[in-house]
Image (cartoon, rainbow, N blue to C red):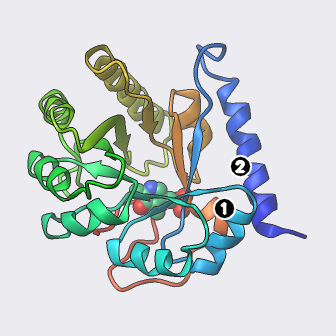
Amino acid sequence: MNVPGDRLAAILGGMRAAEACRIDADTSPDARLLAVSKTRDAGEVAALAACGQFAFGENYVQEALAKQRELTHVPLEWHLIGHLQSNKAREAATAFDWVQTLDRAKLVALLAQHRPPDRAPLNVLIQVNIDDEASKSGCRPDDITALSDAIAGQPRLRLRGLMAIPAPDPDMARRRDAFRAMKSLFDDLAARHADIDTLSMGMSEDYGLAIAEGATMVRIGTALFGPRNARRPGSSTSGTASSA
Ligand SMILES: *Cc1c(COP(=O)(O)O)cnc(C)c1O
């Protein structure tokens, strides 16, 4: 039995089923899977890559760098999904292909300044605090326009869309409201920046719902790798973004 391959196949099947539930199922793009590899070792990443999964998400810059050093022989795409502190922006601009947690103007300038000239522009998503939780990162919906224009003015950055981590509300109807609100913000942003293509939302527990409501990328850890038990100090075992 090939456990990583079986879990991957089950999730991809669930994603395809959820796409069929979309209102605009005929015209909307397939959703992409981001495998969230925080707390997993390089061997587990390599096992999934051997099954055809090449996009991985990490919450911490240092943890990502350590795995990348062991995996130089595999062409992988790395996404930062944890909160980005300004003093880590230089390393993040080098270590990742995507930063999904851009949530303030200061990071726009820092990431653009430090993206190495020999690399493709850094793909970025604006993280939105959709539930207006005081403790969480992410910008306010009202800040999206100014941030998106700032990103569009930076040739070393490429704006790809929006990301959110809705509150893990046990009431799925309320999660759906958050996903719908994000889809509406995404459509508004697409009217201003026509080439955006990514709405990153939905995790192990709710990725089907997120895709049905318009997610084009889901970020899945537990359902792919099994429960996280190896914990880093200060890391989170729930879906909330931990600090980079
Ligand atoms: C950990 C994490 C995930 C994955 O959560 P699971 O519930 O394990 O699928 C997704 N997004 C972010 C930002 C995370 O920190």
Residues marked 2 and 1 touching at CB (< 8 Å)? yes
Identity of the residue furthest to the right in this view = 1
Q: Secondary structure at mark 1?
A: helix
Q: Is residue 204 left or right of residue 107?
A: right
| Residue at 56 percent of width and 45 percent of height | 206
Query: Which one is in front, 195 or 115?
Result: 115
Q: Is mark 1 within 8 Å of ligand 1?
A: yes
| Residue 114 position (above or below residue 17) | below
Q: CA distance from mark 2 to mark 1?
A: 8 Å
Q: Is residue 213 visible?
A: yes
x, y (%) of residue 201?
46, 42
Q: Amino acid at mark 1?
A: Leu
| Residue at 40 percent of width and 76 percent of height | 65
| Residue at 29 percent of width and 52 percent of height | 101
Q: Amino acid at mark 2?
A: Ile
| Residue at 53 percent of width and 68 percent of height | 37
Q: Secondary structure at mark 2?
A: helix
| Residue 168 position (above or below residue 38) | above
The residue under label 1 is 224
Number of residues whose C-alpha sits closer than 10 Å to that of mark 1, classed few (under 14), some (14–19) or many (20 or more): many
Q: Is residue 62 left or right of residue 109?
A: right
Find residue 47 and name its label. Answer: none
Identity of the residue furthest to the front in this view = 118
| Residue 51 position (above or below residue 87) | above
Q: Is residue 131 visible?
A: no
Lower position in the chain sequence, tag 2 or tag 1 = 2
The residue under label 2 is 11
x, y (%) of residue 170?
49, 49
Where is residue 40, by image quadrant? Answer: bottom right
x, y (%) of residue 73?
60, 72
x, y (%) of residue 2?
85, 68
Locate the C terminus by quadrant: bottom left
